[in-house]
Amino acid sequence: MIQYFKNINNVTVEISSPENDAWVNVAPPLKQAEFEQLSEELDIPLDFLTDSLDIDERSRFELEDNVKLIVLKTPTENTSINESDAYYITIPIVIILTHNQIVTVNSFDNAAIKKFLNTFHNRHPEKRNMMVLKIFEKVVVNFLDYLKEINNRRNQLEQKLYDSNRNEELLYLMQIQKSLVYFVTALRSNELLLMKLERTNFLGLNEDEKEFLNDLIVDTSQALEMANVYTNILSSTMDAFASIISNNLNQVMKRLTSITIVLSFPMLVASIYGMNVHIPYAEAPHAFYIPVILSIVISVIMSWYFMKKKWF
């Protein structure tokens, strides 16, 4: 699906065809015929448009026939039906600067592009470099929001893990850990891209735009540091709670073993007095009560001993 937007008197207007100083957004569902049509209309190399289809595409920039390509990684929720997959993954955003338009291509629904669309009425499409930097900003904000959400989810799972003897919570933490691995990799790649853009001045930025780009590099570094910290905390947490679950299981097994030992003595007394041989006091009038009382006394003594040892 191809969308054309233009800012007219601070109002976002969707138009039917590409115009000068317009924003062209290609969103799912993606069709090869639309790529070919857009490539011919705006004189864009076809591979620039199809690069977004590769989910593993790295962050980079490229110039061909005076058309500039920038690929940036951004986070998104994982819609996979596989329960063992990460909660969040990273996907590429393709930004293309033609002679008169700015084009974005997304292979998935993208929160950063939606935020950019909501603020497009405040943008100046003729200042294409600032448009690109504002997309970068929305991507960084998106990373920070998801990192905070991941941290909150981790805290909630930790509370459930304190008295847990199951592996289910640990599996949820593993999904969060996978998400953080995606984030760390993408943020490191984005940071290198932004630093290279600053060093080479690929976009031809003025002083104000360079200062804004430098702020974006700082924010990206902060997001990367947060992701690294959360990853280290999560790794330590998983190791600690794996030990807690093992200790909880040991306590349960200890209690079950103690109960088994306590019950084994009455069974032993009953089996002895149930033998078909002559035993002491077998002919006594209260012979039935002797093994019963003996079993109770032994059970009480053993229970007191195990409670003193804190096995119960």
Image (spheres, rainbow, N blue to C red):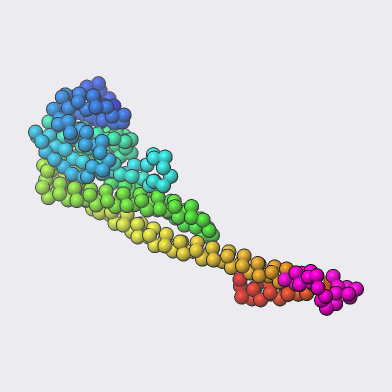
Instruction: Say whether residue 86 is visible.
Output: yes
In the displayed image of the protein, which residue is found farthest to the left?
65
Q: Judge from the rendering whether residue 137 lies leftward or rightward of residue 164; answer left or right.
A: left
- Nearer the observer, 232 or 191: 232
Q: Judge from the rendering whether residue 152 lies leftward or rightward of residue 180; answer left or right.
A: right
In the displayed image of the protein, which residue is found farthest to the top?
16
- Nearer the observer, 109 or 202: 109
Q: Residue at x 42, y 59 (%)?
A: 238
Q: Does residue 196 sit above or below 25 in this rendering?
A: below
**Which secondary structure class fits the magenta region best?**
loop
* 273 in magenta: yes
Q: Judge from the rendering whether residue 254 lies leftward or rightward of residue 277; answer left or right.
A: left
Image coordinates for residue 156, horizontal then vertical, percent:
47, 53
Q: Does residue 222 sit above or below 204 in this rendering?
A: below
Q: Does residue 180 sit above or below 17 in this rendering?
A: below
Image coordinates for residue 78, horizontal then vertical, percent:
37, 42
Instruction: Say whether residue 266 is visible.
Output: no
* 83 in magenta: no
Image coordinates for residue 77, horizontal then vertical, percent:
37, 42
In the displayed image of the protein, which residue is found farthest to the front?
277
Q: Residue at x 23, y 29 (%)?
A: 24
Image coordinates for residue 256, horizontal then vertical, percent:
62, 65
In the displayed image of the protein, which residue is found farthest to the bottom?
280
Q: Residue at x 82, y 76 (%)?
A: 279
- Nearer the observer, 42 or 138: 42
Residue numbers of the magenta segment? 268-288
Q: Residue at x 23, y 48 (%)?
A: 190
Residue 37 occupies quadrant: top left
Quadrant for the N terminus, please.
Answer: top left
